[in-house]
Structures are given as C-alpha cells and as structure tokens.
Image (tube, rainbow, N blue to C red):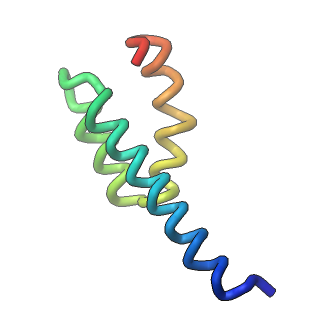
C-alpha cells in the first residue's frame, strides 16, 4: 500500500510538471497561426495527459524546427 505521504508528493510533482509544460508552451511556441492557442488548450483541458502529449508529440518537433 502506498504511504499517505507519498500521494500528495506525487500530486505536487504532476502539478509542477504540468505547470512547467504550460509555461514552456506559452513562452516558446511561435505566435503565428493558432498552434500556441491549440496546444495551450490541450494542456489546460487535459491536464497531465495533455502535458505528456505536448512533451512527446510537439516539443521535439518544435525544438528541431525553431531550436527553442
């Protein structure tokens, strides 16, 4: 059984990961088109799942394309 102190720690970890991904999207996605808005909505609405989708689906291609 998972200790009671571990569950809040995991929740805080997921929140910090989600926050980091959201800030990364909002500060480094290009402003032209709707990509920034769409990805921000995916991250906001799907929470941690959306953050993981962004990190594995969009972030690597953005880094290759823009270097940021």
Residue 37, placed above or below residue 32:
below
Residue 42, placed above or below residue 54:
below
Q: Residue at x 31, y 27 (%)?
A: 28
Choose between 61 and 20: the one closer to the eye: 20
Q: Residue at x 75, y 83 (%)?
A: 2
Q: Is residue 37 left or right of residue 28?
A: left
Q: How far from the left and from the top, in percent, is residue 61? A: 49, 21
Choose between 64 and 23: the one closer to the eye: 23
Q: Residue at x 53, y 71 (%)?
A: 11
Choose between 61 and 19: the one closer to the eye: 19
Q: Is residue 33 left or right of residue 41?
A: left
Q: Residue at x 27, y 32 (%)?
A: 27
Q: How far from the left and from the top, in percent, is residue 45? A: 34, 59
Residue 33, placed above or below residue 42:
above
Q: How far from the left and from the top, in percent, is residue 30? A: 26, 22
Image quadrant occupied by the N terminus:
bottom right
Farthest residue toward the left? 32
């Amino acid at each position: 059984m998972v200790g009671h102190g571990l569950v809040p720690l995991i929740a805080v970890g997921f929140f910090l990961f989600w926050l980091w991904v959201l800030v990364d999207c909002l500060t480094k996605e290009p402003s032209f088109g709707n990509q920034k808005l769409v990805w921000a909505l995916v991250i906001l609405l799907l929470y941690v799942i959306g953050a993981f989708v962004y990190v594995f689906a969009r972030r690597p291609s953005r880094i290759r394309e823009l270097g940021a």
